[in-house]
Image: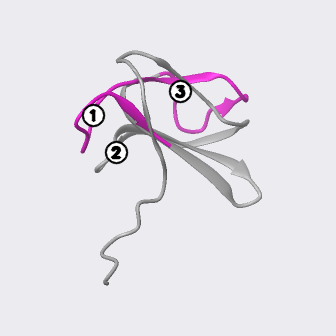
């Protein structure tokens, strides 16, 4: 058997417009259109750990912004390579 790709992450099915919350505090390093992920947010939490939240319909943060754990950073959607509303985490 040949492994053709590795799917790193989980897809969390939600309704359109569901608030997406930061898993931990950190600094937003990218917030915008990311190929494949659609409207996405990447947060650097320090110590080599970053999280990505993809396929959102709109974003509530900007690159360079500090965020707190639990803060709303986006609203879920189905942008990019997506077939329905969910958050790719």
Q: Is residue 4 above or below residue 23?
A: below
Which image quadrant: the N terminus? bottom left
Nearest to the eye among marks 3 and 2: give it: 2
Write down the residue under mark 3. Answer: 61
Report the front residue among 54 and 27: 54
- Dot 2, how many residues are within 10 Å of its Cα: few (below 14), some (14-19), or many (20+)? many
- Dot 3, how many residues are within 10 Å of its Cα: few (below 14), some (14-19), or many (20+)? some
Write down the residue under mark 2. Answer: 37
Q: Is residue 63 left or right of residue 78?
A: right
Write down the residue under mark 1. Answer: 79
Magenta residues? 60-89
* Disc 1 to disc 2, C-alpha distance: 7 Å
* Disc 3 to disc 2, C-alpha distance: 16 Å
- Tell me where residue 48 appears, x and y as whole percent: 70, 61
* Disc 1 to disc 3, C-alpha distance: 17 Å
Q: Which mark is residue 12?
A: none
N-terminal of the pair, mark 1 or mark 2, is 2
Tell me how the rendering is colored. Answer: one colour
- Tell me where residue 11 appears, x and y as whole percent: 43, 41
Could you say which quadrant of the image residue 7 lies in? bottom left
- Tell me where residue 53 appears, x and y as whole percent: 48, 39
- Dot 1, how many residues are within 10 Å of its Cα: few (below 14), some (14-19), or many (20+)? many
Q: Are marks 1 and 2 in contact (CB under 8 Å)?
A: yes
Q: Is residue 60 left or right of residue 81?
A: right
């Amino acid at each position: 058997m040949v492994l053709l790709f590795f799917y790193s992450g989980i897809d969390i099915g939600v309704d359109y417009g569901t608030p997406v919350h930061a898993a931990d505090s950190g600094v937003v390093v990218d917030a915008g259109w990311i190929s494949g992920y659609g409207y996405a947010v990447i947060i650097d939490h320090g110590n080599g750990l970053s999280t990505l939240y993809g396929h959102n319909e709109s974003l509530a943060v900007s690159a360079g912004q500090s965020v707190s754990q639990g803060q709303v950073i986006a609203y879920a959607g189905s942008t990019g390579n997506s077939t329905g509303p969910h958050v790719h985490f």
